[in-house]
Image (spheres, rainbow, N blue to C red):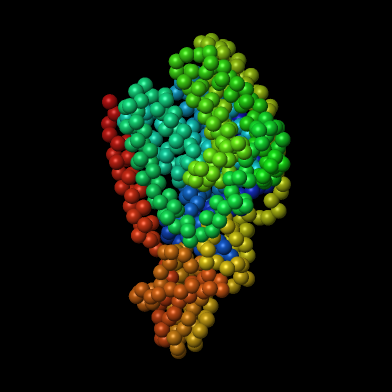
Amino acid sequence: MAVLLFAVLVASAPALRGPFWGHDIEAHVVRVAQWARGWADGVLYPRFFPDVYWGFGGPTMLYNAPAPYAVGALAMALGLSATDACRALAVGAFALGAAGAFLLARATLSVEAAALVAIAYTLVPYRLVDAWVRGALSELIATAILPLLFLAARRAAARRPAWPGLAFAVAALLLCHPPSALFCLPAAAAYGLLMAPDRRAAAAGLGLGLGFGLAAAAGYWLPALADHGATHYAASLVAGSPYHFASHFVQPGQFVSTRWGFGLSQAGGEDGMSFQVGLVHLAGLALGAWVAWRQRGGARREAAFWLASSLASLLLMVEASRPLWELAAPLQRVQFPWRLLTLVALAASLLLGVGLEALTGVSARLRRLGLVALALVSLVAYARYAVALPPPPGVDLDAQATPAALQRWIGADSIWMPRVLRGAPPPGPRVRLLEGEARARLVSDRTHQLVLRVEGATASVWWARIAAFPGWTLTVDGVAAPLAIDPATGGLVAAVPAGEHDVALQFRATPLRHGAEWLSLLAMLPIAAACARPRD
């Protein structure tokens, strides 16, 4: 266990020293800071961040999975900066992933073999790429949940009353990283069925867990699916987009290449980042093939499943699978075929443990020697990737995430920008008079709400630096009034009668969002009741 703890510390090294960097780190810092601002403003689930997209705000959290940023905001409430909260998320993801991999392996393997699996999964190259090259914190956390998802699927399939654990794991994965859920949930269901002693009975436990897990997370994913047409998301699925799957196939040689870099993924084989499986993990796949060929019983089924999952994932990452991607439209939402390295990482790590167990039989001494040897090999092979120094960030991430700084840059992913926005106007006030003789006093400028006291000698028209998006409403003295959109900027426009009036712009739940939230709450009731039921 000491070696496992050391492996977690090695994998977490960039978060514990020096500058914090990654392709997406700035966006994560902004999301954590904006979520914390939402909580300070009294909004439990801030779907519309007020300061991104040049200060117009946007529905960032209508589409991005909320769980990582809620946890990050909690860390900020405990005194951390937004950047340090993101560091803590990365370290926590490595610790949780190690614990989850150990528990999954321990269901069938010895303590020694399970510890080896956890070490291998902690140091697998793709997770290090997620953390310290891509800065993909949401996906990194999803990789930490993944072993627990498979363990929960196995238990739910073996014993129907265990389905609440699967429901929690399914909801957690969806609330952290939906692209991973697209291929991991079917794989987990298949694993549960394959390893179940009674496959007909297993379907009930798996069905309950998957169904209630989907319902519990519906408050997030249902509105995200329904409302993405008001953003630029559809353009990301078109050929030529940097998010289109066809630009991100992996050349077979890249799976075995030990080249490491901090650049971007691109078409062809000259990517700036690594897509290696890892030399130790390739050995795990070879051991898995040997076990699937020579062993019998549960070990053979276990090895066969993980080996087949790896081979299928590797196939889907190369250009030869393009027709399948074009045929299966939902699969395109994964965006990057190399994301399937997530499954390969877990499978190859588990197969190391399965192979160690098969090679050494019941000898505890040989198992311990094999564990130490393979753990040391893993540390030697991969530690250099974990401690490799990335380019310096060149910016103060926390300073970049302030409301004033966000008026000067996008601050969020361009694919979720409201389609009505028309470029980047210079920084300026939240409201501006367009027509009439009137003046306004800003009463409140909070997440999901802007309140003005308007005094006008004539009727007036006001422009607000708020991106027009479904959910925004206008009330004048508490009475609903129509909103318009400024065609030049995409901001909201409100007409106010002459005289003194209280004008409020509020972002409210649409009927669909409200219904989805109720569905999530109602789904949690039977899950909680099942958890509270006494066990025999």
Q: Nearer the viewer, residue 473 or 383?
A: 473
Q: Residue at x 66, y 55 (%)?
A: 396
Instruction: Work out which quarter of the rendered image holds the N terminus and state it.
Output: top right
Residue 326 seen from this side: yes
- Residue appearing at x 63%, y 58% in the figure: 399
List x then y, in percent, for residue 494.
Answer: 45, 76
89 to 7, vertically: above or below: below
Q: Is residue 59 above or below residue 195?
A: below
Q: Residue at x 40, y 80 (%)?
A: 501
Q: Nearer the viewer, residue 526 or 229?
A: 229
Question: Is residue 389 among the parts visible in the rendering?
Answer: no
Q: Is residue 31 left or right of residue 274?
A: left
Q: Locate the C terminus and report the quarter of the image it occupies.
A: top left
Task: Look at 47% across and 27% down and name the residue there.
Answer: 104
Q: Quadrant of residue 370?
A: top right
Instruction: Give the answer, above or below, for where 184 lies relative to 237.
Output: above
Task: Name the foreground residue: 271 vs 17.
Answer: 271
Q: Quadrant of residue 499?
A: bottom left
Q: Is residue 206 left or right of residue 16?
A: left
User: Horizontal and vertical percent for residue 349?
Assistant: 56, 27
Question: Closer to the camera, 90 or 317?
Answer: 317
Q: Is residue 2 above or below residue 38?
A: above
Q: Quadrant of residue 9?
A: top right
